[in-house]
Image (spheres, rainbow, N blue to C red):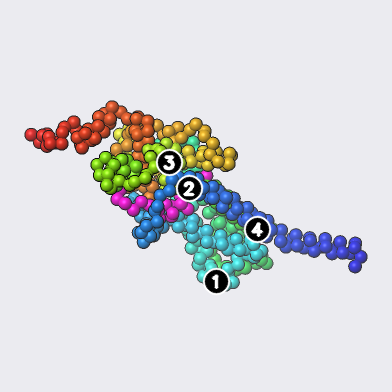
């Protein structure tokens, strides 16, 4: 075959391929890039979490799965305030369920089809899309209510200084994004339905959609070309918005929609009042009082409590990434309510900020390079001293976080490493050591106060 003819054939084939597959190739590239970046970000977060010290939380898997079902999936703690719980649940369920529709979008994008499931599901397809539309509208309305609650009514726990700057913008960005995604979904269906009514070739009859079916007649005067442009634009923006959202999650408090599940699974199953003993201190006491029970050959303790994220457990660090910044802990904290500086929400946000900084440090240098900072660069002594260890923050947290664990570890470091405690506390410590009680009375006079 002459080479000129061969070249023309090759060109023609390439052009045909180009026309047929350009959209699919573009879509495949976007999907691959979105998934790759998300996986990369999540693996960095996982690496950061496991910078914490080991903690074995693999016991009692039955109780742990129960927590996943009740606390993460069922959002049990949210239902203490039923109205807010229902609104939150609709957003959460709506977001998850509507995204099932993304499965069809993904397959359509990769295979070059349109409404792939329609021929297989028939009337049931119409029913599902109608259900999605009602959910989408509910999510739209509730996001608008939440925006009003945050920005116009300024609910106290959202108007706190803890949220100044990025955290406040983050919450608003997500609510706006959800409104935009839901609007795109409804507009896409409206244009699609209008095209169906016009008898456009590639738009097969789906039956009427409840909500977009009301908008479709308003588009009857719009040309087929403009409607296709509208439908395709909404389709692309909707799926690109979802890929963007996926990659925004690791930088946002909304990462909790993923991490709430492992965090509920690995929640501490011990009663809330139980503080973990410091094993190395316990061993010292055993050496003094019951040497026969003390372990032999134990290495001398290197450190007491926590100064930086490396000294916290991996579960403490998972807690920090799971925090939704809802402020329910701070609203219940007696120290905060009585005007002290302490906010358990801020403790979690500060821990996450420090962990992020350490992660960036490792990424830039290959391994952690001392930056002269630690958790005390974010959290002050005054905040730590204000905690009454009442556990109200732990009780209130809807996603199984224990801010008190971090406070206790930091306070242990302050007192045992830096001897940084107020005089009154030091007196109490020496009384406990000498009199086995916080008071300055010998043990045999402990009931003297009754007289
Ligand atoms: S345990 Fe501490 S931080 Fe938590 S609510 Fe009580 S005082 Fe506040
Ligand atoms: S620790 Fe829990 S209650 Fe407190 S802000 Fe975070 S998610 Fe909300």
**Residue 441 in the figure: left or right of residue 52:** left
Label 2, secondary structure: give it: loop
| C-alpha gap between disc 1 and disc 2 | 45 Å
Residue at image mark 3: 311
Q: Compared with residue 5, is residue 55 higher up or lower down, i.e. above or below?
A: above
Magenta-tinted stretch: 251-273
Please tell me which residue lies in front, 208 or 145. 145
Q: CA distance from mark 4 to mark 1?
A: 25 Å
Residue 94 vs residue 259, the one in the foreground? 259
Asked whether disc 1 touches disc 3, contact meaning CB atoms under 8 Å apart, the reply is: no
Which of disc 2 and disc 1 is earlier in sequence? 2
Q: Which residue is mark 2?
A: 50
| Figure check: 171 above or below 430 | below
Quadrant hosting residue 215: bottom right
Q: Which residue is mark 1?
A: 121
Quarter placement of the C terminus? top left
Mark 4 or mark 1, whichever is nearer to me: 4
Label 2 or label 4, whichever comes before in sequence order? 4
On the image, which quarter does residue 53 sit in?
A: top left
């Amino acid at each position: 075959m002459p080479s000129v003819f061969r070249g023309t054939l090759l060109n023609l084939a390439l052009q045909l391929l180009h026309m047929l597959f350009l959209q699919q190739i573009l879509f495949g590239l976007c999907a691959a890039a979105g998934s790759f970046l998300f996986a990369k970000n999540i693996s960095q977060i996982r690496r950061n979490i496991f910078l914490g010290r080991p903690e074995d939380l693999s016991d009692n898997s039955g109780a742990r799965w129960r927590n996943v079902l009740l606390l993460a999936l069922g959002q049990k703690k949210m239902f203490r305030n039923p109205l807010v719980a229902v609104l939150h649940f609709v957003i959460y369920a709506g977001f998850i369920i509507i995204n099932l529709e993304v499965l069809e979008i993904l397959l359509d994008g990769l295979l070059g089809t349109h409404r792939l499931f329609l021929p297989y599901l028939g009337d049931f397809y119409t029913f599902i899309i109608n259900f999605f539309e009602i959910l989408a509208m509910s999510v739209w309305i509730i996001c608008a209510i939440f925006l009003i609650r945050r920005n116009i009514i300024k609910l106290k726990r959202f108007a706190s200084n803890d949220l100044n700057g990025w955290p406040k913008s983050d919450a608003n960005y997500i609510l706006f994004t959800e409104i935009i995604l839901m609007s795109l979904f409804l507009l896409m269906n409206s244009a699609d339905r209008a095209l169906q009514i016009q008898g456009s070739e590639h738009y097969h009859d789906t039956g009427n959609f409840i909500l977009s079916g009301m908008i479709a007649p308003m588009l009857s005067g719009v040309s087929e070309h403009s409607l296709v442009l509208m439908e395709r634009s909404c389709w692309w923006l909707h799926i690109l918005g979802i890929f963007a959202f996926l990659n925004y999650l690791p930088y946002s408090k909304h990462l909790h929609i993923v991490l709430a599940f492992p965090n509920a699974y690995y929640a501490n199953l011990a009663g809330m009042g139980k503080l973990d003993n410091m094993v190395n201190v316990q061993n010292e006491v055993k050496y003094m009082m019951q040497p026969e029970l003390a372990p032999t050959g134990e290495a001398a303790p290197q450190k007491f409590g926590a100064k930086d994220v490396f000294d916290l457990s991996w579960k403490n660090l998972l807690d920090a990434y799971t925090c939704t910044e809802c402020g329910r802990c701070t609203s219940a904290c007696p120290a905060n309510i009585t005007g002290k500086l302490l906010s358990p929400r801020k403790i979690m946000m500060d821990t996450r900020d420090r962990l992020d900084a350490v992660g960036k440090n490792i990424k830039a240098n290959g391994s952690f390079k001392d930056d002269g900072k630690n958790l005390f660069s974010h959290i002050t002594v005054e905040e730590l001293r204000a905690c009454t260890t009442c556990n109200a923050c732990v009780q209130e947290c809807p996603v199984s976080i224990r801010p008190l664990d971090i406070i206790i570890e930091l306070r242990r470091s302050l007192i045992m490493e830096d001897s940084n405690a107020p005089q009154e506390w030091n007196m109490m410590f020496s009384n406990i050591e000498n009199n086995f009680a916080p008071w300055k009375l010998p043990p045999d006079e402990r009931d003297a106060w009754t007289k």
